[in-house]
């Protein structure tokens, strides 16, 4: 606690000092009369408006900063946005805003919706797509149900790609990144094909060797990445009132190896790892791991595609927009299920997702007594998830002998080595249909005061079929016997098959007040409700019908804030206070053995303050920063899964392992530090008549963060700061540029995910794995533009 207070004081002191310096410089050195910040246009309200006119808490990262700082994907971007967490979990991507997100179950919908050029991407796998030729990324915080729809209960990420240009232009860029031996090449070409047709094509190829060493497989640790992204965009002005935009994109991102390590191991687990896996095994949080699979190497490969047609008919007094999109991906992965050098448990999954969506928007021009935006939305999605879990007890002889002895004693059998080795199969197919109608109305009661209100009706239908069975590898027993072995004893798998359907209707709304005290300030108050759709447990390894389904979760939120332009346009200060109450939270917590507990078992309260500021100190220097204070905790969670330490104590007292629960009421949520902040400076100055020097630095800091879903403090990420910086030299006209980018210059070793290793009941209780982030890297960039 002492360290936390010191860090907060130090960060706030530096922030206040920086702001004081900026204020003094802005007052004493006014500079040119036209020195003002550029207006940032966003589409957070489904209209192109200035950032300072949007009445919600909103963070924007421009495309040029994404490229300059070498942000590869959303996970990199999250470092720059306080209260945003995006990272890779054990079996799915994790997207959280203000401590609210979706747990570890592929059956969960997302709590943070991802939108690209107005199209909803409903699966976490899409968030792993590499960045390419973007205009900006907007992070909308808090419920966004009216305009963006279901599954934005925590917020939305609104990505806008770059559009074709009226003039011919292009670039070629290459980069090399140290530590991971990474290389990337990007290219873009844009311009007119005729007076009414414009086109833009962009491509990016990147690969790297990763930052881990795996002593169990000859030193190759990864995660080795090989990514290819291609995009083409065509705009056609069919008439003065009608325009079409066609976009096609293809992504391939392959990863070999993983960034996880066994950071803590009990004596029994350490003995087993060294004796039957890797003699050099040593637990610890670092860049050396010991992992081996039994059937195929660790990897995850994704191939994704998007075809989108947007039509805009604008006759001046009314605009109609149609957005039609077909998206899909194939996702394959194989993971080391025991997270160690043992050739014991492996998990592989093949996931396919196809989605069709159609949205129509009717928009008034704005500036009338009543402005409105109305729309309808239709979506169908097909999800297939096939799992195979190879379990090779023969890879761990002591456990194999112990389990066979227990079975022989109970059933009078005489099992031999290999008889209980098996492949466990599970199949999950889900069809989803969503329809919605929505409208938002702005009543401009006075020039300086307006009321905004909106409603959205949504209907969601889901139908699934799920089945599973163990198929023996040994030759002595049948599948029913293996069901008996793997079900009651290891809780890994059963033989089952079922089909279920569900549908739900929701009416959500918001009411907002906006007041402009003067031309340079805006105050707002919003009250909104929202939901995240219910569904079916994709895991449910034993096929228990009582655990097959979970219900929707809901939120009621209130936010008050202000946006201010200061120093005659040279500065901006924005702030928001928020309070949200979430009910029936969908949670998935690991039981410490082989499964996850999925239920609507919790309620939470999220309260906090967010502020950001930007100042043009001189025509060459811009300073900016952001601060987030957060109190996000479970209001009620009486039956969470126990931590490993609690399970050991519970079992030692003679209780059945599966009955262990803990009360997390009053405890903090995952990925919800009490404070997070960043401070950035950008300095650009001409050198002579032709050259330009650029310097930038970002300091990103965070308080202690809960990582584990069961709140296990052993996995908490401690307070830390990361420093990124860039120095560039190029021509003033932008013809060429070279730059050096340093990431994590303080070389902080941090984690974004961790949990208990499986099979705690077989001697692994008190053993944990964690994902470790990249170390310090230096990147050399070069770009030629034309």
Image (cartoon, rainbow, N blue to C red):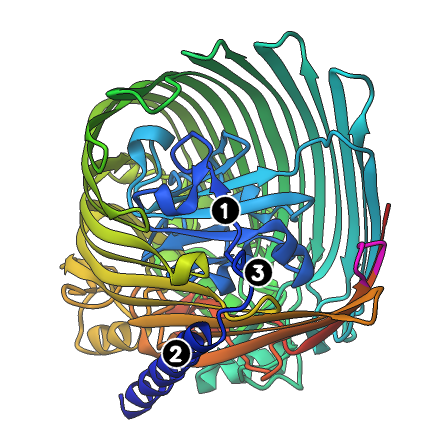
Question: Is any part of residue 180 visible from this angle?
Answer: no
- Residue labelled with disc 3: 76
Of circles 1 and 3, which is in front? Answer: 1
Give the quarter of the figure containing the C terminus. Answer: top right
Residues under numbered marks 2 and 1 in contact, where contact means CB atoms less than 8 Å apart:
no
Does label 2 or label 1 sit earlier along the sequence?
A: 2
The disc placed on residue 40 is: 1
Q: Secondary structure at mark 1?
A: loop
- Residue labelled with disc 2: 15
Q: Residue 735 colored magenta?
A: yes
277 is higher (above) or lower (below) than 663: below
Q: Main secondary structure of the magenta part?
A: loop
Disc 3: CA contacts within 10 A as few (<14), some (14-19) or many (>=20):
some
Q: Which residues are magenta?
A: 731-736
Q: How many discs appear? A: 3
Q: Residue at x 42, y 25 (%)?
A: 465
């Amino acid at each position: 606690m002492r360290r936390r207070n010191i860090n907060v004081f130090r960060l706030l002191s530096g922030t206040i000092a920086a702001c004081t310096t900026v204020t003094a410089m802005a007052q004493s050195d006014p500079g040119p009369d036209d020195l003002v910040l550029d207006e940032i246009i966003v589409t957070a309200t489904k209209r192109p408006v200035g950032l300072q006119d949007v009445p919600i808490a909103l963070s924007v990262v421009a495309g040029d900063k994404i490229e300059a700082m070498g942000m590869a994907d959303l996970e990199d971007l999250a470092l720059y946005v306080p209260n945003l967490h995006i990272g890779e979990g054990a079996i799915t991507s994790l997207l959280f805003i203000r401590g609210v997100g979706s747990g570890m179950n592929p059956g969960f919908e997302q709590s943070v919706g991802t939108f690209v050029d107005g199209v909803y991407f409903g699966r976490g796998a899409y968030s792993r797509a590499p960045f390419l030729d973007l205009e900006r990324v907007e992070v909308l915080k808090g419920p966004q149900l009216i305009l963006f729809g279901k599954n934005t209960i925590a917020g939305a990420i609104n990505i806008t790609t770059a559009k074709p240009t009226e003039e011919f232009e292009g670039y070629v860029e290459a980069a090399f990144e140290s530590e991971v031996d990474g290389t990337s090449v990007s290219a873009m070409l844009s311009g007119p094909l005729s007076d009414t047709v414009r086109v833009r094509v962009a491509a990016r190829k990147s690969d790297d060797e990763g930052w881990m060493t795996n002593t169990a497989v000859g030193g190759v640790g990864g995660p080795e990445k090989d990514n290819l992204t291609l995009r083409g965009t065509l705009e056609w002005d069919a008439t003065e009132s009608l325009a079409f935009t066609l976009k096609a994109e293809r992504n391939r991102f392959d990863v070999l190896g993983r960034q996880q390590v066994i950071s803590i191991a009990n004596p029994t687990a350490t003995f087993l790892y060294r004796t039957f896996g890797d003699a050099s095994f040593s637990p610890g949080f670092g860049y050396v791991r010991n992992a081996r699979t039994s059937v195929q190497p660790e990897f995850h490969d994704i191939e994704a595609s998007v075809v989108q047609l947007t039509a805009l008919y604008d006759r001046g007094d009314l605009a109609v927009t149609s957005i039609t999109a077909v998206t899909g991906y194939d996702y394959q992965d194989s993971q080391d299920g025991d997270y160690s050098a043992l050739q014991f448990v492996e998990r592989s999954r093949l996931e396919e997702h196809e989605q069709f969506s159609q949205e129509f928007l009717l928009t008034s021009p704005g500036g009338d007594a009543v402005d409105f935006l109305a729309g309808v939305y239709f979506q169908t999605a097909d999800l297939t998830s096939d799992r195979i879990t190879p379990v090779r007890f023969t890879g761990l002889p002591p456990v194999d002998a112990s389990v066979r002895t227990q079975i022989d004693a109970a059933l009078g059998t005489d099992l031999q080595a290999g008889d209980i080795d098996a492949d466990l199969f599970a199949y999950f197919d889900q069809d989803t249909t969503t329809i919605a109608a929505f409208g938002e109305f702005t009543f401009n009661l006075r020039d300086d005061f307006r009321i905004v209100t909106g409603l959205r009706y949504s209907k969601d239908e889901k139908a699934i079929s799920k089945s599973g069975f163990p198929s023996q590898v040994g030759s002595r027993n049948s599948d029913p016997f293996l069901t008996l072995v793997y079900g009651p004893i290891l809780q890994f798998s059963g033989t089952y098959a079922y089909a279920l359907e569900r549908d739900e209707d929701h009416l959500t709304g918001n009411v907002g007040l906006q007041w402009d005290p003067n031309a340079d300030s805006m105050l707002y108050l919003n009250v909104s409700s929202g939901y995240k759709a219910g569904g079916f447990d994709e895991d449910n390894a034993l096929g228990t019908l009582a655990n097959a389904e979970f219900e929707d979760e809901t939120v009621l939120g209130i936010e008050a804030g202000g946006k201010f332009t200061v120093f005659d346009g040279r500065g901006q200060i924005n702030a928001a206070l928020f309070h949200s109450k979430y009910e029936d939270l969908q949670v998935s917590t690991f039981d410490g053995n082989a499964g996850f507990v999925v239920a609507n078992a919790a309620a939470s309260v999220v309260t906090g303050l967010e502020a950001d500021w930007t100042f043009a100190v001189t025509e060459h220097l811009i300073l900016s920063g952001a601060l987030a204070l957060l109190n996000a905790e479970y209001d009620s969670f009486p039956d969470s899964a126990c931590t490993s330490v609690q399970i050991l104590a519970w079992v030692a007292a003679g209780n059945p392992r599966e009955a262990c629960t803990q009360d997390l009421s009053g405890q903090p949520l995952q990925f919800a530090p009490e404070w997070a902040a960043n401070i950035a400076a950008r300095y650009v100055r001409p050198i002579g008549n032709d050259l330009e020097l650029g310097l930038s630095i970002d300091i990103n800091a965070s308080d202690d963060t809960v990582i584990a879903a069961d709140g296990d403090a052993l996995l908490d990420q401690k307070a830390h700061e990361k420093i990124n910086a860039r120095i560039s030299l190029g021509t003033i006209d932008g013809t060429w540029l070279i730059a050096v980018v340093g990431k994590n210059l303080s070389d902080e070793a941090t984690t974004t995910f961790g949990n208990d290793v499986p099979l705690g009941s077989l001697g692994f209780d008190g053993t944990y794995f964690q994902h470790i982030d990249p170390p310090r890297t230096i990147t050399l960039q070069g770009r030629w533009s034309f």
